[in-house]
Image (cartoon, helix red, strand yellow):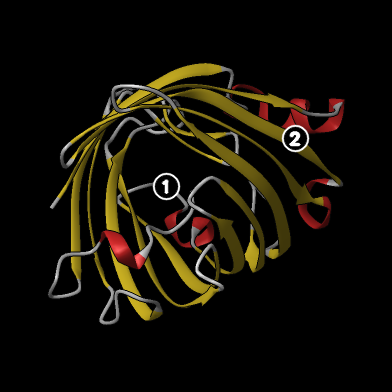
Amino acid sequence: MLVPQAASAAPNGWLFEVSGATGATTRGIVESDKTPTVGIGASWYPDPGGGFFIGASALTMRSTHFPEEGAKIVADAGYTWRVHGDWTVQTIVSRYQFEHMPFAARMGYAEVALRGGWRDTVFASVTASPDTAFGPSPKSRAFSYDIAGRLPLAHGFSATAGIGYYDLRAQLGSGFVYGDAGLTYEYGSIQCDLWYIGTRAPTQIQARMGSLLAHRWIADVIWHF
């Protein structure tokens, strides 16, 4: 998901959100599939026209692989450039931590991203991580490549779709494709999403990750304030 644009922030630079969803996935990988998730987040954009920003968020999650409920915590910082008004470019450094989950220390990782967008309609990103691990694999580099689009419709609706590739050759010997398509409805500060997420992976990835590869519908509600 692309970082919210600074123009969405309040006059004092702060943007907050509270969310609820039927599940959680990241790049086609299921992170919570037993219970709905609840999330909170805050971002600060001191200059609404671009520039430096910081953010932090937390999300509850519960997977088939552990009975207790845990949390995913993300902190990030970055810089936004606006190019000719219609284009934006962002560089972002993020840290992902997991709490109250087995192997939480191994699951944490850092990431650097370069993201671009045009008129809040077309987005693309490239990310790199130096310390991602899956199962017993050693922590190593991982890359992802994404492109997504949003088509405004009538009465507050938008159609969205995206596709990406997660390069995990250093950990699993290959990578896989993931994608999603759905609808977004916005009413004031409330946003509702419904989308289908699917993956296509080679045999060795399917054998290692199994049910963690997403093929499901997910719905969420987000309140921005």
Of 113 and 203, the residue lying toward us: 113
- Hey, what amino acid is under mark 2? Val
What is the residue that sits farthest to the front in this orientation? Answer: 84
Asked whether the viewer can see residue 194, the reply is yes
Q: Which residue is mark 1?
A: 102
| Residue positioned 57% across, 56% down in the render | 118
Of the numbered discs in the image, which one, if any, rests on residue 42?
none
Q: Earlier in the sequence, mark 1 or mark 2?
A: 1
Q: Is residue 86 left or right of residue 49?
A: right
Q: Secondary structure at mark 1?
A: loop
How packed is label 1: few (under 14 Cα within 10 Å), some, or many (20 or more)? Answer: some
Of 77 and 211, the residue lying toward us: 77
What x and y, as percent, mark residue 124?
Answer: 64, 53
Q: Which residue is mark 2?
A: 177
Of 111 and 89, the residue lying toward us: 89
Q: Secondary structure at mark 2?
A: strand
Distance between the alpha carbons at the discs numbered 1 and 2: 27 Å
- Hey, what amino acid is under mark 1? Pro
What x and y, as percent, mark residue 174?
Answer: 85, 44
What x and y, as percent, mark residue 48?
Answer: 29, 74
Q: Quick check: marks 1 and 2 in contact, CB under 8 Å?
A: no
Quadrant in which residue 10 is drawn:
bottom left
Of 136 and 47, the residue lying toward us: 47
| Up/down of 20 relative to 49, above or below | above
What x and y, as percent, mark residue 46?
Answer: 25, 81
How packed is label 2: few (under 14 Cα within 10 Å), some, or many (20 or more)? Answer: some
